[in-house]
Amino acid sequence: MSRYVASFEINSKTDSYAARRILERVFDTVREESSNVRKGSDDTSELLESFKTLQDAAKRPTAGKLEIIYEQYDDEFEN
């Protein structure tokens, strides 16, 4: 398994705004893709709720850290 980490330190209102925009974009993308691929499934609702919580948390401009972790498993997708 490969693991990639990107950290974004939020030290200003500008940084906070950038983090909020990142999370808004991620939420919108996940929502769009989920509605096309997994329409109506329970795991879609849970996934969207998790991202919505992150998006809501980023609405208040505060200092912090946004960290994105991508773990790439050795298994491949089935065709």
Image (cartoon, rainbow, N blue to C red):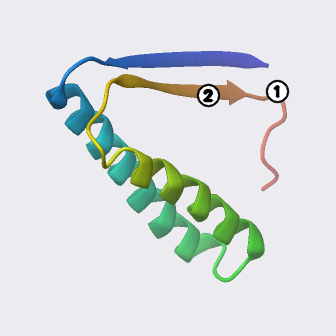
Which of 63/69 is in front?
63
Residue identified by numbered label 1: 74
Question: Is 34 placed left or right of 10 in the picture?
Answer: right
Numbered badge on residue 45: none
- The structure residue drawn at horizontal position 27% and vertical position 45%, both measured from the top left corner, is 21
How many numbered marks have been drawn onto this rendered protein structure? 2
Question: Is 19 placed left or right of 56 in the picture?
Answer: left
The 10 Å Cα crowd at callout 1, few under 14, some 14 to 19, many 20 or more, is few
Residue identified by numbered label 2: 70
Q: Position of residue 77 (x, y in %)?
A: 78, 47
Circle 2: element type: strand
Circle 1: element type: loop
Q: Which residue lies furthest to the left in this view?
A: 14
Where the C terminus falls, by quadrant? bottom right
Where the N terminus falls, by quadrant? top right
Type of residue at label 1? Asp
Splitting the image into 4 quarters, where does residue 62 fall? top left
Relative to 75, does residue 15 appear above or below in the rendering? above
